[in-house]
Image (cartoon, rainbow, N blue to C red):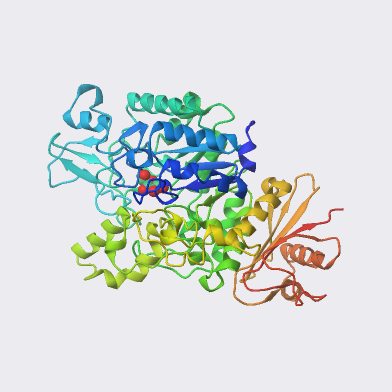
Amino acid sequence: MDGDCAWREAVVYQIYPRSFNDSDSDGIGDLRGIVERVDYLAALGVDVVWLTPVYDSPQVDNGYDIRDYRSIHDAYGTMADWTALRDALHERDIHLVMDLAVNHTSDEHEWFCRSRRGDEAYRDYYVWEPGEPDEPPNNWESLFGGSAWTYDETRAAWYLHLFDERMPDLNWRTPAVRDDVSELMNWWLERGIDGFRLDVINLLSKPAGLPDGDPAASITGAGHFVDGPRIHEYVRELRDRVFAADDVMTVGETFDVTPAEARRYVVEDGLDMVFPFEHMDIDAGGSGPWDIADWELADLKAVTERWQTAVGDGWIGLYLSNHDQPRLVSRFGDEAYRTESATMLATYLFTLRGTPFVYQGQELGMTNPRFESIDEYRDPATVLRVERAVQTGDIDAFAEIRDAVNYWSRDNARTPMQWSDAEHTGFTDGTPWIKVNANYPEVNVERESASEDSVLSYYRRLIDVRAAHPVLVHGRYEPIAPDDPNVFAYRRLADDADEQVLVALNFTDGRRDLLEIDGERQRSSRTETGGASMAAFGALEREDAELLLRNYGPTASDEPGSVALRPYEARIYRLATE
Ligand code: GLC
């Protein structure tokens, strides 16, 4: 892919190797397992694979705790297996983006071992603070819960960890840390990778003096370490030293980023795109990590509109799920209408301005599993939080918060990919490292490949439609009937007004007639947007509105004078332009 903007047209597929495909029956997915499935990815039509970390690691956080950036985790295979995967992807014109976590390393990384011993060259590689063992340097909280500080007896000092205590934060003020990171990134580029997904990249800069955070904030200290004082300098330095070339794709994971900061990363600092987080909060309640809020379509509309324009000429990654989030159908859709809501949400994702990211299994409409006991969970963030809640007396037993944990846990996304109705989903011949979702006999690749009406077949069509209509990639976003509580509709308009597309999504399990929405607006509103929406929906009745895609087949309810959307129906129309 050449040129600065080529990544914008791509569709990215995220692979969580541990749960994708196991080639050697140890119950853990691996690189050879992915190689066995590259034809599946090619048939789906994706352009880029983002591989979550496969580096050598003690696997405290499934590989985000890196022990050696230049070798492969044993259970995943060898460097030769990695090379085979790279080649298999490249032969099919699929690019490979590696996930890089450089906010922290594993506590077993050689740098930390030497730093902890006080080795002169590595003393300042991590964020160490002197102090008494019973008084942490400040009140910052880890994103996994509890204090962000651990006292180390060997060095007789505190070290900072924004995640698990076995994942100490690197000290980016130290020039040698920045040298080493640039070097290892270039080392991977020399091995023929096509880009990086930069893990929590906006957390690298911690302010001098490490001031206390606001205890009322949802994560104490986040106000200081999210988009910290020198962060843009660090990212620009990486750009200059590593990814200045046009054809290196860079995606920043920017935790809780504001629109203004996001714009700086992509417009000024040279990242190709960042991931917004705001839409992942619409169902989060205000009282603690397990709180679930009822969300309304108005919330999603507001966030979408903000982020469709937030970064100006810059770019965002579009996603509704990943390895840290619950499954999108269970969260924003409706399991009772699994196929309909999965395809409707996919339509939303693929028709916005940005690059769509598909997380493994999303293209099948995979749902959250239901775990009964805390022993079934594997995610350290989930397990630590629950343990802490029991220890502090916030809860007496897991059962009290089981429903909330079942809703939020990152393990929802980490159950094995569902390949077939064979035992263990066809993922492994061994015992899977985490329980499989019980619905695999119905929801699996083999079955969905054989049906034109499946979620999987719809994703293939959607990928084709997006590729055939650049306005869906580059066009301006314009909401239609923004106040309607049930239907999410918008237009995408090419700059030269050559092409116009209208998208209408029914977010409810009821029937919604678009022309009635028009009528209501006609009576109740004289606003400019009201006028635009009337004109837009009215145009659907005319013969020159071409239906590009819908997630239902045609039926008798398509009578003239009505454009009735069935439960979770999604349609994409191409409108005639003057
Ligand atoms: C990112 C990853 C997440 C990981 C964390 C720490 O948010 O997506 O899985 O736990 O960073 O590396």
Q: Is residue 313 visible?
A: no
Q: Give the total of numbered labels.
A: 0
Left or right side of 52 for 37: right
| Left or right side of 508 for 206 | left
Q: Residue 556: percent from the left, percent from the top? A: 77, 77
Q: Is residue 110 in view? A: yes
Name the quadrant of the N terminus.
Answer: top right
Q: In the rendered image, which quarter is residue 411 located in?
A: bottom left
Residue 448 left/right relative to 171: right
Classify residue 507 by image quadrant.
Answer: bottom right
Expressed as whole percent of the image width and height from the top left, the position of residue 191 reads 47, 27
Q: Nearer the viewer, residue 51 or 269?
A: 51
Identify the residue at horizontal 77%, vertical 66% (top origin): 537
Q: Position of residue 445 (x, y in %)?
A: 54, 57
Of residues 7 and 308, the one nearer the viewer is: 7
The quadrant in which residue 291 appears is bottom left
Residue at the spot 55% in from the left edge and 68% down from the top edge: 338
59, above or below 172, in the image:
below
- Residue 261 picture location, percent across and down: 50, 43
Q: Residue at x 34, y 49 (%)?
A: 26
